[in-house]
Amino acid sequence: MAVILGLASSHDASACVFVDGALAAAVSQERVTRVKNDGFRLPHEALEHALAAAAVARRDIDGVATMHSFFPEKFFRRESLAKELEARLIRARRRLRGEAERQLNVNDLLKRAARKGRDIVPYFRRERFLAALGLRPDARVRFYDHHATHAIAAAWYSGFEDCAVLTIDGVGELNIFHTAGTWSGGRLVRIEHSDQLGASPGEYYEAVTEAMGFIPLRHEGKVLGLAAHGEPRRLYAEFSRALRLAPSRRTFDSDFVGRADAYRAREAYLERLVRAHPREEAAAAAQAVFEDALTGLARELLARTGKRRLAVNGGVFANVKLNQRLAALPELERLFVFPAMSDTGNSVGAALFLLQEMEPRQRRAPARLADVYWGSAFDEAACARALAGAGFGFERLGEDALIARAADAIHAGRVVGWFQGRMEFGPRALGNRSMLARPTEAGINRTLNARLARTEFMPFAPSVLAGHADAIFENVARSADCLPFMTITCDVKPQWRARIPAVVHVDGTARPQTVARETNPLYWRLIEAYRERSGIPLFLNTSFNVHEEPIVCFPENAVQALAEDRIDCLALGALWVERRGR
C-alpha cells in the first residue's frame, strides 16, 4: 500500500500523511512554527511533525499531492529563456539582500498556459522539488485544483453515500470562489462554479472584517461575535449592494460585478459603510446578508439535485451561524462541515485524490469522521522536562486521580489547562489542547478574556456529553455530523440558559462540542466527573492559547501559559501542577 504526502502551501499551510489508505497524521504549519496563519511557503516544519506522528520516513513516501497554489518560484521555470534568465537574476539579487524566498502565484501561470492550450506540468521542476523535500526521485508528484480538494475532503469524510457538495471561500485557482456538485458512489462531479470579480462571499466577509479594524483571514469570528449585538435590518439594503444571490440563484452578485476594479471598489464601499455606522449594526447586517445569500444558493442546489444531504468546505464555513442556518433548511436532512475548512485542510483533499489514483480500490469513503486527533503527541519525559525547565514541581497521577483532581478544580472555579494525547487538526480545540472552566458564572467570560488577552464580546463554547446534548440544545439530530467538531451553533433551550451562562451567547446560542466515550474516553470521563459534582453534563472549553497565538503544540507552550497566569492548573499528560496561591 502507498504512503502519500499531502501538502498545502497557501494560506494556513499544512502537511498530512496517508499510510495504507488511512490518514495517519495531519499538522498545521502554524502550530509548529508558532506563527499565526503561517503559509505561502512549503510547510517543512509541519511535514517533519506529520512524518513523526505517522511513524514514517521521507524515503517511505511514494507520492506527493499538492494544489495549484503558492509555491517557491524556483520550482517553476519561465515560459521563455529570456524570462527564465530575468527570474534567476531577480532571485540572486534577493538572496544578496537577504530577502525571503518569493512565492509564485501559480494562478498567473495557469492562466497563461490555459490561453495557449497547455498545462503547467511542463514548467514544474519536479526533480528539484523532490530533492528539496528529501524525497525519493521516483516519487509521484500531482497537482490538484484548490476547490476540488475542498470538495473531496468534505464529501469523503461526511460518511454520506450520496449528497450535494458545496465549496465557497475567498478565491482559488483561476479566480474560482464557489463550486457546486454531487458525490455518489465515491465519485465527485462538479456541476458549476463561480469566478465573477466582485461577487465572492469570502472576499466580502474579509473586506467587512478589515473595514471594522480587524485582521482579514484571521478575525472574521470577531465580526460574527459582534453581529449578535446588533439589529440586522437597518443596514441590510446597503450591505446587499456588496453581496446578494444572483437572479439564477446559482451564483452571487453585487453592484460591482463587471467593473475592472470590482474588488477594490467593493472594498472601498464597505469601508465607507462600516465607518459611518456603529460596528454592531454593521456586523449584524453584514452577517444577515451573508447568511441569506449562501442559504439561498444551497437551497437551489438541493432542489436541483434532489439531494437531502449536504457536505460543505471552504473558509466561509468557519462561520458557525451560517452553518446553523444551513442545518435548519427544510430541504435538508443532514449537514457535514469538514472540520479543517480553511486552506489548511486542502493537504488532506489533495492526498485523497492521489490515494484514489494510486490505490484504485480506495474509491469508497470510510464511515463518518469520528475525530481529528491527527497531530503530534509528546511523551511523559518531554512533559517533565518542560515543567522542570520552568521551575515547576509536579505530581504524577494515575488516570482516576488525574480526572478527580481536574474535575474538582473546575468545579471550584479554577481554570484548567488540559494537554493530552495527539493534537487536533483544524481551528478548534476539541479536548486535547483545551482550557477548561465551569459554565455556571457569566462573569468568567470577562475574567477569562482578560487573562487570555481576548476580545470581550467573543463567546466561549461548551464540551458536552453526547448523550445529554439533545436535552440542552435544539436541532441536535440535524447537526449531529457537525457537533463533534464545534463547526455549528445551536439554540440553547430556555430552561438551560440561566444554568450555563458562561457558554451562551447574547443571542441564546452556543457552539457545542459533543463528546462520545468511544472517541475520547479520557475527556469524556472528565466531563462525566464534573457532572457528578455539579449536576451539569458540560463545561466551558476554549482553545489553549493566548489571543493572536496558535493553539499550543509543545509542552513548553502549555507550561508558559501556567507561568504567565493564563491558567490556574495544568494537566500535562499524567503530570499535574498548580500555581501557588491559586
Image (spheres, helix red, strand yellow):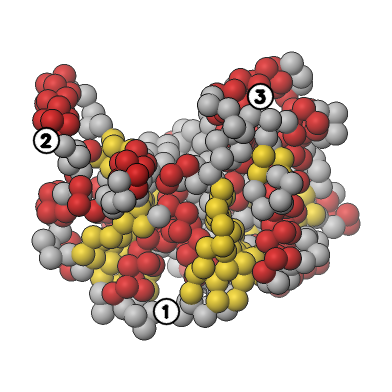
Residue 407 position (above or below residue 205): below
* Quarter of image, res 212: top right
Check disc 1 and report the residue beneath it: 363
Amino acid residing under circle 3:
Leu
Q: Quadrant of the N terminus?
A: bottom left
CA gap, disc 2 to disc 1?
Answer: 42 Å
Q: Which mark is residue 340?
A: none
CA gap, disc 1 to disc 3?
Answer: 45 Å
Check disc 3 and report the residue beneath it: 270
- How packed mark 3 is, by other alpha carbons closer than 10 Å (few <14, some 14-19, many 20 or more), is many
Picture coordinates of residue 479 (x, y %)? 70, 64
Q: Which mark is residue 81?
A: 2
Front residue of 313/188: it is 188
244 left or right, relative to 96: right
Tell which circle, 3 or 2, labels the residue nearer the N-terminal end. Answer: 2
- Residue located at (68% from left, 61% from top): 301
Amino acid residing under circle 2:
Leu
CA gap, disc 3 to disc 2?
Answer: 44 Å
Front residue of 524/66: it is 66
- How packed mark 2 is, by other alpha carbons closer than 10 Å (few <14, some 14-19, many 20 or more), is few
Amino acid residing under circle 1:
Arg
Tell which circle, 2 or 1, labels the residue nearer the N-terminal end. Answer: 2
Front residue of 73/101: it is 73
